């Protein structure tokens, strides 16, 4: 188990002051930077992209958003004809391995390139843990995401270990580019999504057949305040009162043990009225897809997103999506295919200590309720919006097209993308 993971688990088990924990994490990050330097040197020798097998490094076996991104990227490369080896580093970082797959547990010797789905602090930690040997002689790409307009200054330490940075949205690319050395390319490659059909199954989730069902979902480990579930609950209740239709909200939560006091605050907000159902059960990817397919509307009143995987998945499933009109979700959302909510930018305040500077959005709850109520009361409008959403993201997030683009950047030839 890694030191940073140990600190996270300590914070769950004991009432550790968040500010103290944040300082401990920073100190641990600095220690890894020093270790990486001592074991691997200040900078790798730069490499040029060339054809050959691609090693995708990430949390392939874990139920994490960044793990889902790594799995989707691997699938898109394979769909585009590349030879891919998945190196699962979940256990190295203390994450539970819940997903089966043909994952390598050590870096493959034959890989010509590595695409690393780890944000910079974890990348430096991996270099420190391995001595940097897996990265030598290979073209290395850092596939990074961040949720604010400026990335943390301590990201600088990771730039020396990659040859390029691929950001999942223009929002992220702009944030990264402000800190990146001029010689290091920063490209935009959105997360690919399969255009798969999942059959709705309301009975499996005990959802009422006739009601309009609204879904909001988030992982507490990704930031409770940033995901803003309390704002979503309040918007839904206003919308339900305005629309007058039979309705239910499902609030799907992952990682609830990561911040028990915040989870308790959400439960208190929801209460026992029965109009909002809290779901904290662990779901497989297939089960989560079935849940999305079974609802009518997906609501994301986030304060900021690097990409926003759930709204994209909902749009691919042909669902109407109501979302904050700011940050990385605008990579695939437009006014024509989504119900975007106005906002004002406010200083970041994060009780979890995940974010400690910058600004993010405060979505207009009243406007969100109005847009949600209009969709709840008009099934035809919901279907039309969902159809436009599906048509748009099917093109923008097409796995084969994005896989070919990635292969071209990895030196596999010109695919005409």
Image (tube, helix red, strand yellow):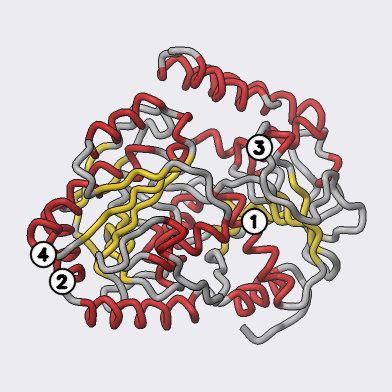
- Determine the CA span between mark 2 and mark 1: 38 Å
For marks 2 and 4, the one nearer the N-term is 4
Q: Residues within 10 Å of mark 4 (few under 14, many from 20)?
A: some
- Disc 4 to disc 1, C-alpha distance: 40 Å
Q: The residue tagged with tag 2: helix, strand or loop?
A: loop
Q: Quadrant of residue 239?
A: bottom left
Can you identify the residue that label 4 sits on? 243
Residue drawn where x is 30% and y is 80% of the image: 383
Between the C-alphas of marks 2 and 4, the distance is: 6 Å
Q: Secondary structure at mark 3?
A: loop
Q: Which residue is mark 1?
A: 70
Question: Which of the two discs, 3 and 4, labels the residue nearer the N terminus?
Answer: 3
Which residue in the protein does label 3 denote? 96
At x 35%, y 45%, the residue is 227
Q: Is residue 154 left or right of residue 312?
A: right
Query: Above or below — where is 68 with respect to 42?
Result: below
Q: Residue at x 71, y 56 (%)?
A: 115
Provide the secondary structure element on which disc 4 rests.
helix
Residue pointed to by mark 2: 377
Contact between labelled residues 4 and 3, with CB atoms less than 8 Å apart: no
Q: Give the mark nearer the N terminus: 2 vs 1.
A: 1
Q: Are marks 3 and 2 in contact (CB under 8 Å)?
A: no
Give how far across and how far down residue 259 sits, in percent.
42, 28
Q: Is residue 167 left or right of residue 116?
A: left
Q: Earlier in the sequence, mark 3 or mark 2?
A: 3
Which residue is rendered at x = 81% and y = 59% of the image? 85
């Amino acid at each position: 188990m890694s030191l940073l993971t140990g600190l996270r688990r300590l914070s769950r088990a004991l009432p550790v002051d968040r500010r103290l924990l944040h300082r401990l994490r920073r100190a641990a990050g600095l220690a890894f930077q020093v270790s990486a330097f001592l074991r691997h040197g200040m900078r790798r020798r730069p490499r040029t992209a060339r054809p050959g097998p691609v090693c995708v490094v990430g949390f392939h076996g874990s139920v994490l958003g960044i793990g889902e991104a790594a799995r989707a990227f691997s699938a898109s490369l394979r769909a585009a004809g590349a030879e891919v080896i998945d190196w699962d580093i979940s256990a190295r970082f203390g994450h539970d391995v819940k997903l089966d797959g043909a994952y390598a547990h050590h870096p493959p010797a034959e890989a010509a390139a590595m695409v690393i789905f780890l944000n910079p602090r974890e990348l430096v930690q991996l270099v420190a843990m391995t001595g940097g040997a897996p990265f030598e002689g290979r073209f290395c790409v850092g596939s990074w995401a961040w949720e604010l307009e400026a990335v943390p200054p301590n990201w600088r330490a990771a730039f020396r270990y990659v040859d390029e940075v691929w950001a999942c949205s223009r929002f992220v690319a702009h944030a990264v580019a402000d800190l990146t050395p001029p010689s290091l390319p920063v490209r935009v490659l959105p997360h690919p999504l399969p255009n798969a059909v999942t059959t709705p199954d309301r009975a499996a989730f005990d959802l009422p057949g006739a009601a309009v069902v609204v879904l909001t979902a988030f992982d507490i480990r990704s930031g409770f305040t940033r995901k803003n579930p309390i704002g979503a609950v309040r918007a839904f209740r206003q919308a339900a009162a305005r629309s007058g239709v039979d309705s239910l909200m499902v609030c799907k939560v992952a990682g609830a043990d990561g911040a028990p006091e915040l989870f308790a605050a959400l439960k208190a907000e929801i209460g026992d009225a029965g109009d909002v159902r809290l779901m904290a059960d662990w779901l497989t990817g297939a089960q989560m897809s079935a849940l999305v397919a079974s609802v009518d509307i997906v609501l994301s009143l986030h304060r900021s997103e690097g990409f926003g995987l759930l709204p994209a998945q909902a749009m691919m499933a042909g669902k109407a999506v109501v979302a904050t009109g700011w940050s990385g979700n605008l990579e695939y959302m437009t006014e024509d295919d989504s119900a975007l909510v106005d906002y004002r930018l406010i200083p970041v305040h994060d009780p979890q200590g995940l974010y400690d500077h910058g600004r993010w959005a405060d979505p207009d709850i009243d406007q969100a309720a109005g847009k949600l109520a209009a969709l709840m009361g008009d099934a035809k409008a919901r279907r039309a919006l969902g159809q436009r959403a599906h048509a748009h993201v099917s093109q923008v997030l097409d796995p084969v097209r994005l896989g070919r683009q990635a292969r071209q950047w990895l030196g596999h030839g010109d695919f005409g993308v």
